[in-house]
Structure formats: C-alpha cells, structure tokens
Image: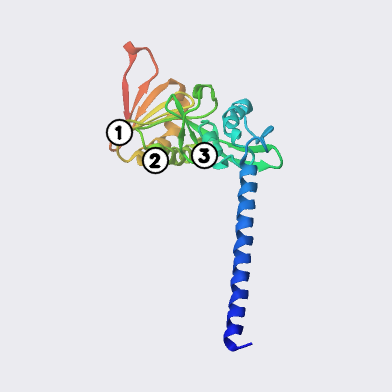
Amino acid sequence: MTAYQAFVAEHGKRTLRAAILMLTVAVFVYLGRLVTDKLLDPDVLPYRTVTVEGSFKHVDADTVRAIVVPYLGAGFFGVDVGDVRQALRTIPWVDSATVRRVWPDEIRVTLFEQTAIAHWGDKALLNSADEVFVPDDPAGIEGLPYVYGPEGTAMTVMATYRIMTRMLAPYDLHIRRLNLDERRAWHLSLDDQLELVLGRENAMERLQRFIRFYPEVLAGKAREIKAVDLRYTNGFVVRWNIPSEKVFNSEMG
C-alpha cells in the first residue's frame, strides 16, 4: 500500500468515526428531547398532594392551597416554584415561603409568618423589620402599641419608639401611642392615658426633662393629669384632667 493509499484509508476511518459520533449524539439529543417532553407533560406526573407546613396563627392553610393549585397544572417538572413562591407573598401575613417538589406527586410549602410589633396607624401593622403590611383586620391584633407617621417614616418612628421605651422603662411607664405628625412634631400617650407633647425639636431632651420631674412632682398626681406640654425652654405646662370650666395651666421649671 502506497503512502497515498494509507492516507486515504486513515482519512476514511476518521470520517466514519466522526459520522458515528455525530449520529450517536443526534440519537441522544433526540431521546433526551423525547424524555424531556414526556416529563413535562402534565398528564404524566400530575400533582396529587399540596402540603402546607409552618408555625402560623394568621395564615389560613386552605387559602395557601387555593393560591398554589392553579400553578400545578404544569405537572411535576413543569411548575415554576419561583412563581408559586411569589404568589404566596401576596398573602399579607406571609413573610417568606419555601416551595419544594417532593417525588413523585407532592408540592410542599413551608411558610414563615410576619411578626407584628406595632400598629402603623389604624389600618396597617409593622413587622420585625419595621416594614408596613396590611392584613384584613389589623384592629383585631391586641397588645401592640400604635405608632403613626407620614409615609416613609416607619423606621424613624420605630427607632424613636425604642429609644423612648428604654428611657421610660425604669419608671414603669409604657408608650401606648406615638405620633409623628405632618409637621414632624412628636406626641405620645402613655398607658395611663397621660399625653406628652414634645414638639418638633429636641424631643429626647424634652422627654428627659419630663422624666427628671416625674418621680417627685408628677407621679403622685398622674391620674389627674391629662397632658404635659414640654415645648418650653426650661419648663413645661400641665393640663389637668378636670371639668373644662375648672381647667388651669401649671407651668413648672
């Protein structure tokens, strides 16, 4: 065999091997598509079970299932668990959710519920991240303080609430309502209905002034006091909780 004939024979073998390899790859691709199409066929691996897990008080498991079920028509592998997770976040009390496929016919949802720490106005709540959420009946959630503020000020108001709470705690005083009005003036009400007017500036200093006088001057008469106005440089005005015809102001410095 001449060198040319040997070259032609070797080239033919390489061409044959390449053709066989290409044919093999094409067969595997074809079979892969068949298998994929089969697995994505919702009639082949349909969902039969929706399991809802988690420790929650305000989320209804049937509501969760009602949201999940429309997504399951795509079958076991066709369902987009990310879309299901996003849909579950539309439930106000849901903080986060995990969604998993469990072979061969189960979708498993694990929910983490919002932790409410305060009422935000009269129609919403704040969670532990100081984020506003709006459940169906926020007024039915008892035992939480009420905080108010213009839109976008929730974090500022809650930070102030926490500082003021620590300041008042040693005197067994607790904030029932804290309000930052549109003029950025602070008002707060304590559990015993006593109101403190702090104004726009130096709110912490003015609260500290109240604390300084409270034990000896005000504590014994707290039930008789309607409000303490601390918007003064060196003192405050007491408004007494008595009939209007007998109201008088007392300024103390």
Q: Position of residue 205 (x, y in %)?
A: 36, 41
Mark 1 lies on a secondary structure that is loop
Which color scheme does this rendered protein use? rainbow
Closer to the observer: label 2 or label 3?
3
Q: How many marks?
A: 3
Closer to the observer: label 1 or label 3?
3
Q: Disc 1 marks which residue?
A: 231
Quadrant of the frame with the N terminus: bottom right
Q: Disc 2 marks which residue?
A: 156
Horizontal side of 233 relative to 141 (left or right) equals left
Residue type pointed to by label 3:
Ser
Is any part of residue 113 visible from this angle? yes
Q: Disc 3 marks which residue?
A: 128
Is any part of residue 115 visible from this angle? no
Q: Earlier in the sequence, mark 2 or mark 1?
A: 2
Mark 2 lies on a secondary structure that is helix
Q: Nearer the viewer, residue 122 or 52?
A: 52
Q: Position of residue 24 (x, y in %)?
A: 64, 61
Q: CA distance from mark 2 to mark 3?
A: 14 Å
Q: Position of residue 169 (x, y in %)?
A: 51, 37
Q: CA distance from mark 1 to mark 3?
A: 32 Å
* Residue under the image location 65 percent in, 37 percent down: 107
Closer to the observer: label 2 or label 1?
2
Residue type pointed to by label 2:
Thr
Q: Are marks 2 and 1 in contact (CB under 8 Å)?
A: no
Bin the neighbour count of mark 3 within 10 Å (Cα to Cα): few under 14, some 14-19, many 20 and up: few
